[in-house]
Image (spheres, grey):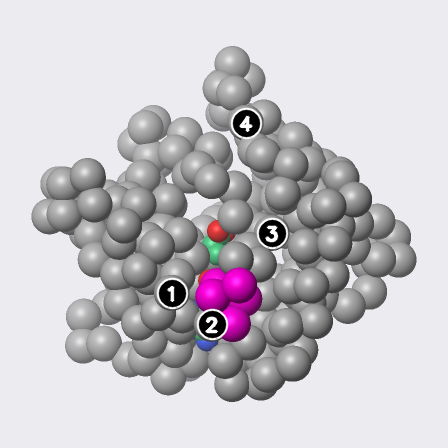
Amino acid sequence: MMNPKIDATKSHNRSITSTSSTLLSSSSSSSTTVDKFQQVIHSSSTDGWQKCWEQGLTPWDLGQPTPILVHLHKTGALPKGRALVPGCGSGYDVVAIACPDRYVVGLDISEVALERAKELSSLSSQEHFEFLKADFFTWRPTQLFDLIFDYTFFCAIDPDMRPSWAVGIRDLLKPDGELITLMFPISDHEGGPPYKVSTTDYEEVLHPLGFEATSIVENELAVSPRMGREKLARWKRSICLSTL
Ligand SMILES: C[S@@+](CC[C@H](N)C(=O)[O-])C[C@H]1O[C@@H](n2cnc3c(N)ncnc32)[C@H](O)[C@@H]1O
């Protein structure tokens, strides 16, 4: 399915990595950034993310769109219509898949993240995307989505919030819409964010709402620090359960 020639190794070394017991990074300085990021996040239940953005503590940020998402877009393997990227951060993925056939909304709770996203995308054609400040867990627009792409949002929220995450996905997606999750980090470390994830973690909250995976594959285009710890899953709701 994937083109192995696509260079997925351009991630800079600030990317998040983890070991069995703790989160470490490929360099001691980025490990320190992860530690500081976690301290700041846990210092405030209301504006932890905003503070991280203000202090430049964004160790998850690839500095580029997600390679597998770009590949799916370029090969016509993504639904058209309206797409949502919750917790869009710097917004690379929003801009990467926006096109005349697909209007993309990048949602984030941090004003600083959105300012950065707008600045980074200022030279792109603005017609096919927008950035919105809102809380994913309470935001309910009138227009639903044909596609939701989740990468590093599920693992960023407290695991107790995962059932609410699934309800949000259901409420924001059209009944025949598609959810694409890039599941990361598949590991056994403790703590977070990023909190460890497994396919079962997604199934536990999505199955009760009628979502079934139509495919789950290793992400062969993962950036090098994340290689082997990511799976791409595509989910749809079965028609008979779509009223749940
Ligand atoms: C780990 S970052 C991932 C950013 C981006 N997806 C990426 O991969 O670069 C998580 C993002 O989710 C945002 N966020 C956290 N809680 C949120 C919420 N309840 N609603 C919307 N965005 C939220 C944070 O501000 C942050 O930008």
Closer to the N terminus: mark 3 or mark 4? 4
The residue under the point 52% across, 42% down is 62
C-alpha separation, residue under disc 2 versus residue under disc 3: 14 Å
Mark nearer the N terminus (2 vs 1): 2
Q: Does residue 228 show up magenta in the picture?
A: no
The image's mark for residue 10 is 4
Q: Amino acid at mark 4?
A: Lys
Disc 2 Cβ-to-ligand 1 distance below 8 Å: yes
Numbered disc 1: secondary structure: helix
Label 4, residues with CA under 10 Å away: few <14, some 14-19, many ≥20: few
Q: CA distance from mark 2 to mark 4?
A: 27 Å
User: How many C-alpha atoms fall within 10 Å of the one at disc 1: few (<14), some, or many (≥20)?
Assistant: many
3 vs 4, front mark = 3
Instruction: State the residue in front, 49 or 56.
Output: 56
The answer to whether residue 30 is above or below residue 211 is above
From what the image shows, is residue 3 above or below residue 57?
above
In this figure, which residue is indicated by the disc labeled 2? 50
Q: Relative to residue 213, is residue 116 drawn left or right?
A: left
x and y percent of residue 152 in the render? 55, 56
Q: What residue sits right under mark 1 in the picture? A: 112
View extreme (right): residue:
21
What residue span does the magenta drawing correspond to?
A: 51-55
Specify which label sits upstream in the sequence, 2 or 3.
2
For label 3, the SS is: loop
Q: Which mark is residue 23?
A: none
The residue carrying mark 1 has its beta carbon less than 8 Å from ligand 1: no
